[in-house]
Amino acid sequence: MGRALLAADHSSQPPRTETNVAEPFPTPLNTPRQPPNSIEAEQSLLGALMLSEHAWDKVADKLDESDFYRETHRLIFRAIGELNEDHQPTDAVTVADWFAKHDLMDRVEGGAYLTMLANDTPGPSNILGYAEIVREKSILRQLIEIGTEVADAALNPQGQSSKEVLETAEQKIYAIAEQGMRSSGTYTHVKDVMVRAMDRLNELQDNEGDITGVPSGFSALDQRTAGLQPTDLIIVAGRPAMGKCLEREAEIVLDDGTVRTIEQIVQERPGRVATLNADWKLERAEPEAYVDDGFKPVFEVESGLGRRVRTTATHPFLTPAGWKPLGELQPGDLIAVPREMPVFGTDTMRDCEVRLLGYFIGDGGLTGPTPMFTAENPAIRKDFAEAVDEFGGVRPVQRVQAERAASFAVATDHELTDGLRHGFAAHLATVLDARGSTARALAEDLDVAPATVHYWKTGRNVPDDDTLARLADVLDVEVAARAGEDPDQARRNRPNPVRLWLEELGLYGRDAHAKHVPDAVFRLPREQLAVFLNRLLATDGWISTYATGQVQAGFSSVSERLARQVQHLLLRFGILARLRLRPIKDRDARRTSWQLQITHAESLRRLVEEIGIHGKDDAVARARTALAGRKPHSNVDLLPKELWVEIDRARGALTWAEVARRAGLPASNLHPYRRRIGRERLAKIGMALQDRNLINIAASDVTWDRIERIEALGKRQVYDLTIPETHNFVADDICVHNTSFAMNIAAAAAIKSNIPVAVFSMEMSDLQLVLRLFSSLGQIGQNKLRTGRLDNQDYVNLQSAMSMLKKANILIDETPALSPTELRARARRMKREHGIGLILIDYLQLMQVPGNKENRATQIGEISRSLKALAKELDVPVIALSQLNRALEQRPNKRPVMADLRESGSIEQDADMILFIYRDEVYNEDSPDKGKAEIIIGKHRNGATGDFFLTFQGEYLRFRDYIDDRYDMHE
């Protein structure tokens, strides 16, 4: 049915004196039917308003001009309203004068139509009846218009799902209902209220207890409030991200490319971090809260790509089914990880320094008296020598020529003479023999590497001046190193500038297992970072093209830290590398090394085109040719098969064959629910279905990695960040996300008092909430629920918790970012269908106000006012969780006060009661109040403020009444 079927046929209107009146509905094409209206009621009502000066007050709050069918009648109603506001008479003469001032006299036939209305009306006594008719017809027309819009949306959804179409229709219908409820309001005489007040007092007298509202389940709170009272808006505020934390060494990339641990970020607050937005794109955001959460049980999560992060069990990860805490995940589950981290710095180095760093970190010897480098490839040797010359003050000196490779020392320009080196070696050997000392013992006494003394004894080098002085003290004898040398010899033995540079970077003295990428490299611009990786891969990297046309590249190191750093630096170029610990076979022992493997076709293309491998030009060229001539086949970066559910939603009534046809795909290539999906295929399907979400997922900045291992590590120091709007950030190259007290109240109301409860959870899924209730009600540890390793008693407790929840009437809405209108509509429906007596909202700052372009504080004000209005309208208490701002973390006394509420002005004004949760052990490791939670009543409109304690059982996410063990309760 099209919109034309709902249009009006004005030719069938009763003849009136009005002419040339434009109507709000067009003439239909194929039906004589017209929208509901009553021209007579409209005319009679307007005539009554012009006859009586008091008639306006009876209808002003029941109608507005849009309720009139004819446009001229709307103008007349507007004129009468404006005249009343100006305290002017509203007869036919004054209304005609209004039309004249607005140059609209032709709309009322020069005033004749107004005179007719006033003369022909039956009188003002029936004006309320006329108003009801006009309003009734207006509602029916609005319903017709909404029906038409719904029909159009169903015929042409434009990417909307059926649920979204229904939601829009429901909102519009409830908006009409809201107008009716507002127009039905009126004043009440005090004597009428007195009757209801006496009924209430009699009800309270019959009540054996002191609780007159909804019991909270906490006796201390109920004593102060007599329960949660109907119409009250109750704000519960606590520290953000309580318990959902990362281990102190988790690494996060800042704007300038610097990598810092989360501990350093919490302490230094240096800048912005990466976060995933609603369109599946990575952007940068500055944390709004930095949380030190003390020592918590920590678990190590390792993914299929070898990425690793350490978090608490409650920290959420992004899965194909949304954000889920680690406690709900297990090996085999998919989690989102960035497929590219394009963050580069602006701190440049000299080109020779960038190349030398790549070489020294790869195949450098950094524990001897001078830096060494070993290479087999002639092109690499030549490039290394050129970089050393460009560095200045040093030159490469070939020390060892093996069968295939040569080792070069980076010596000062004034090379030590053979006579000096061998003379000192002989003298040192004589002294050591005379004292019966060994080279190893001397190295320990001097605090130098044993290899250093070995080089002295074999004539490869001599000590510098400072070391020579210490050597004389240790041996208690003069050790002549420069006998027979000219006066310039001391200058010739000045400190090696390359060695000093490497020491400044924290590299010198590191053996192969301790090598790492220094901080300065992470801040390099893109071009120089590519050069660094190019030279590093030239040492221990490779790229191979097999006879099948498949290409593989990689890098190997015995240093785990170095391998993980290289994996991250490759990710900055969009190169996905898999990290594995592999055995190394040699003649003496079986050792292991960390190996990066690159098999993803797009990653290989980026490696070849943007980075390359110096000295392996032929191998790189073969790989480029193979990649250009072969269609990529890879099991890396495929999208999860769970997305077929989203595709199924988007296709609506279309068959899979029709979806394939529209996407230009063979029907045989669609295998719903059975296999993972390529990005290109999903993009085609998304375009064919005109579904923006599918298109965004296909172009997303994340790939899906499988959890390989979850291992408990015990208690560790943990921290967290709160990111505005998106509430997630990237740590250790994995996407991680940033209620118990309020949920305990909701459970108590539903289970103990049999009161239906509505929970609007915009942060956690319904499954997460139910698992929390299992833990709280059944006293089952979160770790046991996470692993599924329940003992016999746990199963008994679980059955008990399930039995309680089955009887409880708890309704959970997990829709994210609800608007006040959406929430009110859903709450009304729950009230009508289930008679809810309590509403819980988690949490207030996650609600959104569509179309409101003002600042966030103004939006929060609109949200808090709407929640107070909802509590009053439905006559139930509304509990809304709220975050505290970052100022709290910066004070010595961290007990929250009213000003700590985020966007506190409106919340403080609208709330009837504000409760703060404070746990001293969160801030003070040695707190005497471990296991205690202080509940601070910061505001109580109808009672006293104050505070009281509850016991907090963190393992079960449960609060309960507090009993002070210092007192004997039996006395």
Image (cartoon, rainbow, N blue to C red):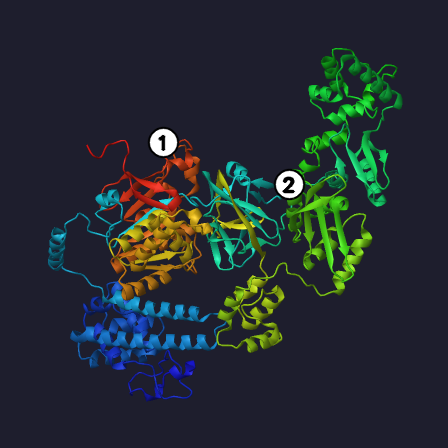
Give percent across and percent down for residue 913: 28, 47
Residue 349 - label: none
Mark 1 residue element: loop
Give percent across and percent down for residue 642: 52, 64
Q: Which residue is mark 1?
A: 928
Q: Please indicate, yes or no, whether residue 209 appears anywhere in the rendered image.
A: yes
Name the kind of residue labelled 1 in the image.
Pro
Q: Quadrant of the C terminus?
A: top left
Give percent across and percent down for residue 618: 82, 54
Q: Quadrant of the N terminus?
A: bottom left
Q: Which residue is mark 2?
A: 561
Q: In screen coordinates, is 502 left or right of 785? A: right
Q: Residue at x 73, y 30 (%)?
A: 367
> In terms of image quadrants, where is residue 634?
bottom right
Give percent across and percent down for residue 155: 46, 78
Q: In screen coordinates, is 372 left or right of 560? A: right
Sooner in the amino-acid sequence: mark 2 or mark 1: 2
> In terms of image quadrants, where is residue 480?
top right
Cα separation, mark 2 vs mark 1, equals: 40 Å
Mark 2 residue element: helix
